[in-house]
Image (tube, rainbow, N blue to C red):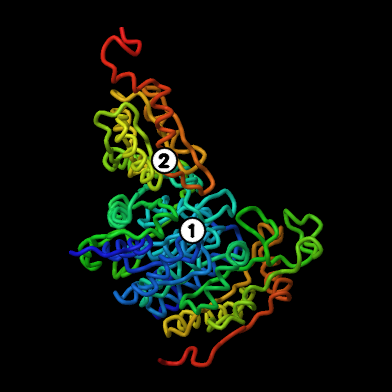
Amino acid sequence: MKQVFKRPAVLRDEEFAYCPGCGHSLVHRLLAEVIDELGIAGRSIAVPATGCARLLPQYLDLDLGEAPRGLGLSVASGLKRLLGDHVVFAYQGEGDLAALGAGQALHAANQGEPITVIYVNNGLLAQSGGQMAPTTPPGTVTATTPRGREGATHGAPLDLSAALAQTAGSAYVARVALASPELIAQAKAALAKAFAVQIQGQGFSLVEVLAPCPEHLHLEPLEALAWSAGELAQRFPLGVLKDIPGNGEES
Amino acid sequence: MSKQLLSGAQALAEGALAAGCRHYFGCPLSPQSQVGDYLAQRLPQVGGSFVQVPSEPAALGMLLGAAMAGARVLTSSSSPGLSLIQEGISHLAALELPVVIADFARSGPGLGNDHPAQSDYFQATRGGGHGDYRSLVLAPDSVQELCDLTIRAFDLADTYRNPVLLLADGLLAGLKEPVELPRPIDPAALPAKDWALGNRGERPGRTLTSYYPEPKFLENHNYKLVRKYDAVTRDQVDWQSHEAGDARLVVVAYGSAARIARGAIARLRERGLKVGLFRPITLWPFPAKPLKELCRVVRHLLVVELNAGQMVEDVRLAVAGRAQVNLYARPGGVLPSPDQVAHRISHYYHQARLHEQDQGPGRGGGR
């Protein structure tokens, strides 16, 4: 009988501790599948950061080096400078990358650091308990915006990926979501492409994943999934934001 | 090997290269920008990498990553830059990553100025970051010693898997002195680090983390760090004494303050005053035991610091009342002259009637 489905080798046989309906477990699985398919488990290094993403080492059988809040891309760059033949990727949420880490992100992208960023944007700070994030859409009720996010106080959501796409050193920037099998397949393809861009040495690559956080949106899992690809995606349109010539071609 | 005339900034760089360091990440900040200027030329000559980064935290992040990969890595900055990376130093200590950080301190608080000062003694020795951790702190007082201690710093960092700080100031960064360069180490000959990331092959994945969700596990990790710090305190204390053998008053000073104190002591010795110097070379671990030992015979100490009085607290803790501890403190980047320091020493010397001990038995209140 032909095997059509199995646990990826780098995905540890552990039950996810994430909340029901959380997007992280799905992103972890897609990452594991891509790493398996590219055959890069032996030379991949992940840089997990703070927030819910700090749990990554429990689930991926890879070399992992934790970064302080905001410093994921610098840590990844330092690793990559020393281990140029490795695939180095940072895994950060919006409360990390788009807040304290935004300055680092701009410079890392602009310098064309040949690293990959998995940027999980669920529109609020999850691990600290559902507060406003830099990417929270206007009007959204969170623990710290009880009347909804108001532009006069907190400004508009920050589209960090769009800013990074404008820098000279970014090679591939894409935004994906997880709300349907088609979107999940696109998300996986974007992850594979981002790694391929790094392996090719084309420059900085980033995949922003619009992910659901039902726990802190106070929604049912399916409603949260729809919100991430609906209300959140209205602010952060899905698609390829940057793809320089030569990406994905045989080198 | 013949001597070369080098500035402190160059001696740090050459010491790092001799120690097998091939990677420097940092950004310019007075009064130590020459370190980067020099390494930007030197590192490519030896197949290394110099990266100017936009901020000190970015440098610290790259240092973290490069150290995780097992390399000997260096950054340097000055006081405000060190303030910016205190969180990162806490992470380095928690992750047990060996790196060397040179701090050519300037005067604070705030922007202050870039004149030499020792007002970051607390920041360096107490650790400005969060959590129970320690950084080893080495305090050179000459360009040669800066070079030599840089090599020792890399060895200590690797031995104990801990960040090591070199604490100097702007005086030493710019000062030029003849330096005998040590024999360079081939980085490829350094022992492999069996905890480093990368080149995994078939072994299981390895995680470097400071996240311990279980309190008991975190406590065990902290106890492990404490045992390491105890071993460092037991084995790595270093100091130098000068003219202390027959001294009745001993000056306690490190770095630039010790240089000035030596000039003062030479002047006073010519006048027959029995004064000496105790110079901590490791600020953490502080040489508490040898200083306490010295106070079996010396009852009067004068701490000379280029700050408002910081190391004096460690001195008082060390001697625990065995000696009278006085302080001559100059904050703000003003370097006192050897004559000014001599005047202070002389003042305390005569106030304590130490000169009367020369008069023989039956005088000076003896019974």
Sort mark 1 into few (<14), some (14-19) or many (20+) by Cα contacts within 10 Å.
few
Q: Is residue B127 visible?
A: no
Pinpoint residue A92: horizontal percent, then vertical percent: 55, 65
Instruction: Decide if residue A118 is on the left or right side of residue A38.
Output: right
| Kind of residue at disc 1 | Glu
Tag 2, which secondary structure? helix
Instruction: Decide if residue B25 is on the left or right side of residue A133.
Output: left
Task: Name the foreground residue: A181 vs B1.
Answer: B1
Seen as rendered, the residue at the extreme top is: B367
Task: Name the foreground residue: B317 vs B360.
Answer: B360
What is the quadrant of the N terminus of chain B in the image? bottom left
In three-dimensional space, the C-alpha distance between marks 1 and 2, rounded to whole angstroms, equals 72 Å
Tag 1, which secondary structure? loop
- Residue A220 falls in which quadrant of the image? bottom right
The residue carrying mark 2 is: B339
The tag on residue B334 is none
Which residue is depicted at the point 45% across and 80% down? A198
Task: Name the foreground residue: B219 vs B60.
Answer: B60
**Residue at mark 2: chain:** B
| Kind of residue at disc 2 | Asp
Task: Name the foreground residue: B330 vs B66.
Answer: B330
Q: Is residue B274 visible?
A: yes
In the image, is residue B239 above or below residue B91?
above
**Residue at mark 1: chain:** A
What is the quadrant of the C terminus of chain B in the image? top left
Pinpoint residue A114: horizontal percent, then vertical percent: 46, 78
Which residue is depicted at the point 34% across and 50% down? B140
Disc nearest the viewer among 1 and 2: 2
The residue carrying mark 1 is: A15
